[in-house]
Amino acid sequence: MNRRHFLKGIGTTLALPHMLSLHGEEKKSTQMNNMIFLSFGWGVTKETWFPNVKDTGANYKLPEGLKPLARHKKDFSLVLGTEHKFNSGGHWGSTVFLTGANRYAVPGKSFSNTISVDQVAAEKWGANHRFSSLQFDCDNAGQSGHGPGLSLSWNKNGKPLAGLRDPFLVYHKLFGNEKMSIDEKKNLIRRQGSSLDAVLMDVGSMKRKLNPQDKDKLDEYLESVREIEQQLAREKAWIGKPKPKAPFKEPKRGLKGYKEIKLMYDLMVAALQTNTTRVISYRQPVESLLKSLDVDISSHNMSHYGKGSRLPVSKLRDQKQSELLAYLLDKLKATKNSEGVSLFDKTTLTYGSNISNSHNIRNCPVIIAGNGQNLNLGQHIAMPKRTPLCNLWLSLLEANGLSQQKFGDSSGLIEQVLA
């Protein structure tokens, strides 16, 4: 019997809770899965990236912008037609891409967010790994079409999680030699912990004297302190446990654009291969990508391509981004985990943008790949207009054994995505 069960009626699909009498024992294959979330700014070239809306199913014609992915066509699906209804303005890039949040939902606040889908997985899977999740980011994120935030990721209180921007530093964070002795590191963590205790001593009495706006600021500050406390606790737990051996040599410093993204992809695969983490997000550069291709048009202006000289630049951007994604899929397929299973088969990968193109926030361009036992791959899946993108996030959580009643503004699962 299929492991998924639904109640259907009046155009709505409702997922039933997990029941052993229906499902039997959990399949071993659902354990130790990974998730990768990739996002780029400014969308795509709509005329050459999107298939015809009626050309759906497995035999759809691969559009020009995705031709570099042709060798992987059976191993990814296009899920198109979704949107975030609260993403008004079209300049918010990736800010709510993984949350779907109504950023003005909290009275008296000019901005708010909620937990991102990657962090739902990180909270469940992260306890036994050096990093519960890894966030990668890019320099000058705003120029690359990304909105407020420090990465794609937001914690359970809707606060931004910092992203690592330099692939050279990422390499050393994952695999670099420790220069401090165990005792020195313990002393450093002890001193840092003492400093936090001192900062928090008078918070209660101070808070009573503050107006509502300042209380919000203090709460945000305390949230940051709690994040630091959690990081220190994790570091303490891993003292004396050596970092894994790097699968490749130390990279060059200062790589930007195309080579930067390629190296970040190598680092993602290495992090999963060494079981350093199971959850990764990456807010990718577009501005530096264009510069690395010797393009002198800004990524913002490129996104307003029209029919002039900017259109070939937009198409070139699509081609190079698809080339890089194909490279990542190659790497995941070729790399085995500790059990000898392809990382591709154990990883759910999502690639897309919160913007279709220019300022258009309808029809988010999204690709899903990997985890073929639980996902329906090789398809063009065209969703009805106004379908929440959060329905896809809810479905990907379901496919990874992380069932939720609801996520963001979701209205149900996308059955076509699930095997």
Image: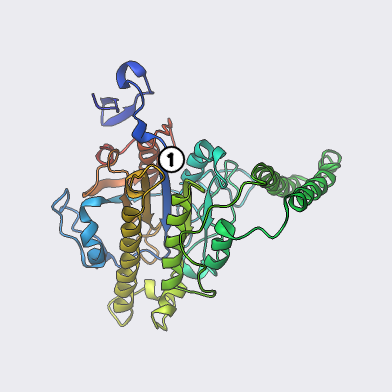
User: Quadrant where the C terminus lies?
Assistant: top left
Q: Amino acid at mark 1?
A: Asp
Camera-nearest residue between 318 and 87: 318
User: Quadrant where the N terminus lies?
Assistant: top left
Determine the residue located farthest toward the top in the rendered image: 21
Residue 193 sits above or below residue 145 on the image: above
Q: Is residue 42 visible?
A: yes
How many other residues sit within 10 Å of disc 1, few (<14), some (14-19) or many (≥20)? Answer: some
Residue 375 sits above or below residue 188 on the image: above
Q: Is residue 412 visible?
A: no
Residue 135 location in percent, x, y?
53, 54
Identify the image quadrant of residue 258: bottom left
Residue 138 location in percent, x, y?
52, 66
Identify the image quadrant of residue 14: top left
Q: Secondary structure at mark 1?
A: loop
Q: Is residue 394 left or right of residue 127?
A: left
Q: How many marks?
A: 1
Q: Which residue is mark 1?
A: 409
State the scheme by which the image is colored.
Answer: rainbow
Residue 214 location in percent, x, y?
76, 49
At horizontal 31% and vertical 53% (from top left) the residue drawn is 333
At horizontal 44% and vertical 79% (from top left) the residue drawn is 291
Q: Is residue 121 left or right of residue 156?
A: left
